[in-house]
């Protein structure tokens, strides 16, 4: 071997050695951070299931969570680039988009408003309809100055549909955890509040509150809202869609794997996969037995559900011309999730 050949072989060896780190990095999972209400809020159960069932590994991501007291706070975190995606209701995203016009919805999670209007147990003889909440205090989830939580939007919607003005009740923040719900209701600080599952079932189990309007029930939801309803979804910044589309593709794929898994497994199997204290598992199992269809079976956007959410958003935004002109369909980017009628 002459000197020229030796130098050429050394050159090839150096290229191979220098290339090893980049090849190793290509095999590493992509870090993805999701901000959302929780932990343990049933509407976001598909996202929490992703690492439990290995959907993250299948899609080549390492999933991290940042939990907040409401969807608007999760969006604030995502908009501040502390997280990549935020979980919240599409209608709440509509309100926030009026000031943050770069928000886009990329994958749906639920196809019904997974909320129950709960009333303090000692008021059962006094509050039998929504109209009976006149003069009462309504607890709401934590929002931001630029956007109401969906819990408050739904509360306002039911009140106005029942002929009550929003000035006839008093809205107060009441957090978004079981302990906060229970404390607010048991102490008498609030008379009623919109509650996610499994917290509604737990409040009922502990005789702290009773159900006044359960929007998980398709017939009840259709009566109040007029049709199928896109509730929770994951959103991100337009900048991330433009600069990191692969991150979107992988997370959307992981969400859809989790949704398919939910619909192909029993409530007991779903709860067993989650890190839930033993005393709280029965409530979530009961919820899933009755309402597993609250989760989107395909992970695709539905035009019909978006239209109902849009009608709801416009009704709760009366008096806000900018909101009335906003179409929620304009916020949806279905390139990765797909869509159906």
Image (cartoon, rainbow, N blue to C red):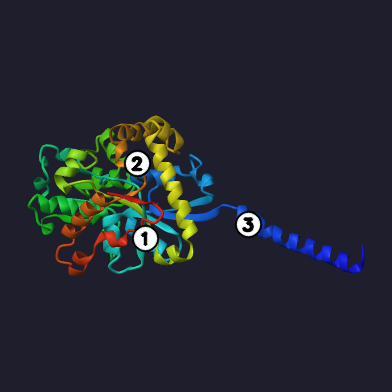
Q: Report if the CB atoms under discs 1 and 2 are less than 8 Å apart.
A: no
Point out which mark residue 25 bears: 3
Residue that appears at 47% across and 60% down = 245
Element on which disc 3 rests:
helix
Out of 236 and 241, give the one closest to the viewer: 241
Q: Quadrant of residue 152?
A: bottom left
Mark 1: give few (<14), some (14-19) or many (20+) Cα within 10 Å.
Answer: many
Out of 285 and 175, give the one closest to the viewer: 285
From where the camera sits, is residue 98 visible? yes
**How far across and how far down the image is residue 59, in percent?**
51, 48
Mark whose residue sits in front, 1 or 2 = 2
**How far across and how far down the image is residue 187, in percent?**
24, 45
Q: Which comes sooner in the sequence, label 1 or label 3?
A: 3
User: Label 2 to label 3, Cα distance in Å?
Assistant: 34 Å
Mark 2: give few (<14), some (14-19) or many (20+) Cα within 10 Å.
Answer: many
From where the camera sits, is residue 147 visible? no
* Vertical position of residue 52 compared to residue 13: above or below: above
- Name the outermost residue toward the right: 2
Q: Which comes sooner in the sequence, label 1 or label 2?
A: 1
Q: Is residue 254 left or right of residue 316?
A: right
Q: Report if the CB atoms under discs 2 and 3 are less than 8 Å apart.
A: no
Point out which mark residue 75 bears: 1
Q: Quadrant of the N terminus?
A: bottom right
**How far across and how far down the image is residue 269, in percent?**
42, 31
Q: Which residue position is annotated with label 2?
A: 297
Q: Is residue 14 left or right of residue 206?
A: right
Q: Which comes sooner in the sequence, label 2 or label 3?
A: 3
């Amino acid at each position: 071997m002459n000197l020229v050949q030796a130098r050429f072989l050394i050159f090839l060896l150096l290229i191979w050695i220098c290339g090893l780190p980049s090849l190793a990095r290509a095999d590493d999972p992509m870090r993805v951070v999701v901000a959302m209400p929780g932990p343990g809020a049933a509407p976001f159960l598909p996202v929490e299931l992703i690492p439990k069932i290995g959907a993250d590994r299948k899609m080549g991501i390492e999933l991290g969570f940042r939990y907040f007291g409401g969807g608007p706070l999760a969006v604030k975190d995502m908009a501040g680039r502390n997280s990549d995606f935020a979980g919240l209701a599409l209608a709440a995203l509509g309100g926030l988009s009026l000031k943050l016009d770069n928000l886009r919805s990329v994958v749906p999670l639920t196809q019904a408003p997974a909320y129950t209007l709960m009333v303090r147990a000692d008021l059962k003889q006094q509050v039998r309809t929504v109209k009976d909440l006149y003069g009462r205090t309504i607890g709401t989830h934590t929002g931001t100055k630029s956007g109401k939580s969906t819990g408050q939007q739904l509360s306002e919607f039911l009140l106005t549909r029942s002929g009550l003005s929003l000035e006839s009740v008093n809205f107060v923040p009441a957090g978004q955890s079981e302990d906060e719900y229970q404390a607010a209701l048991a102490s008498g600080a609030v008379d009623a509040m919109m509650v996610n599952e499994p917290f509604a079932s737990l409040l009922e189990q502990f005789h702290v509150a009773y159900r006044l309007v359960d929007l998980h029930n398709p017939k009840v939801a259709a009566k109040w809202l007029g049709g199928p309803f896109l509730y929770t979804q994951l959103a991100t910044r337009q900048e991330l869609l433009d600069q990191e589309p692969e991150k979107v593709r992988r997370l959307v794929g992981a969400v859809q794997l989790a949704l398919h898994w939910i619909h192909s497994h029993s409530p007991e199997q779903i709860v067993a996969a989650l890190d839930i204290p033993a005393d709280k598992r029965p409530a979530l199992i009961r919820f899933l037995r009755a309402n597993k269809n609250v989760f989107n079976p395909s992970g695709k956007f539905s035009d019909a559900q978006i239209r109902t959410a849009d009608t709801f958003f416009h009704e709760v935004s009366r008096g806000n011309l900018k909101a009335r002109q906003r179409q929620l369909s304009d916020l949806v980017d279905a390139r990765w999730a797909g869509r159906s009628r």
